[in-house]
Amino acid sequence: MTDVVPAPSADDIPVNEPVTVDIGAGQQATVTYTARQRTNEGFVLPTVAVSKRSQSSYEISADDEQIYGPAGIPPTDIDDLAVCFVPAYEFEQELEVQVTNLSDTSREYHIQPMGYERVGGGE
């Protein structure tokens, strides 16, 4: 497994917040993650895992800047949980993951960003 770059400090808070969404045929879902700590100094995001399904589209934005997609595959599959951004993406306040179900049947998707929230001393 690839190391997280940059590495977290001892005070940083892990972020691992799985969400499950049901998306109807031809519909999309957007899941938004925001800073929770008042002393937040940004996020470091090496991994965003999403259920990999054919006939799907995946897009990821951090602080309103698109960092992934649109693509027919997720950065990494929920069953793999591999580090997919080296160096990790860094952003200040908000992560949005948008999944579009392009099939003609309803589907369940799991979305799981993994990284850390800087609490203090971040570079």
Image: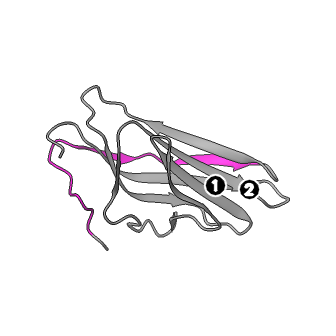
Q: Residue at x 58, y 55 (%)?
A: 59
Q: Relative to 11, does residue 76 appear above or below in the rendering?
A: below
- Mark 2 residue element: strand
The x, y position of residue 108, in whole percent, is 68, 54
Upstream in sequence: badge 1 or badge 2: 2
Q: Residue at x 74, y 66 (%)?
A: 55
Segment tinted magenta in the rendering: 3-23
Q: Relative to 62, does residue 49 appear above or below in the rendering?
A: below
| Amino acid type of the residue tagged 1 in the rendering | Tyr
Q: Residue at x 80, y 61 (%)?
A: 103
Instruction: Specify few, some or many for label 1: CA neighbours under 10 Å numbering under 14, 14-19, or 20 or more.
Output: some
In the image, taking residue 85 as reference, residue 121 lies left or right, namely left
Task: Tell me the residue that label 2 is attached to.
Answer: 101
The x, y position of residue 92, in whole percent, is 35, 39
Query: Hey, which residue is sitting farthest top in the picture?
Result: 38
Quarter of the image where one finds residue 82: bottom left
- The verdict on residue 15 being magenta is yes
Tell me whether the residue at label 1 lies in contact with that at label 2, contact meaning CB atoms closer than 8 angstroms.
yes
Q: Residue at x 70, y 62 (%)?
A: 56
| Amino acid type of the residue tagged 2 in the rendering | Asn
- Mark 1 residue element: strand
> Is residue 98 or residue 23 the one in the foreground?
98
The x, y position of residue 64, in whole percent, is 50, 41
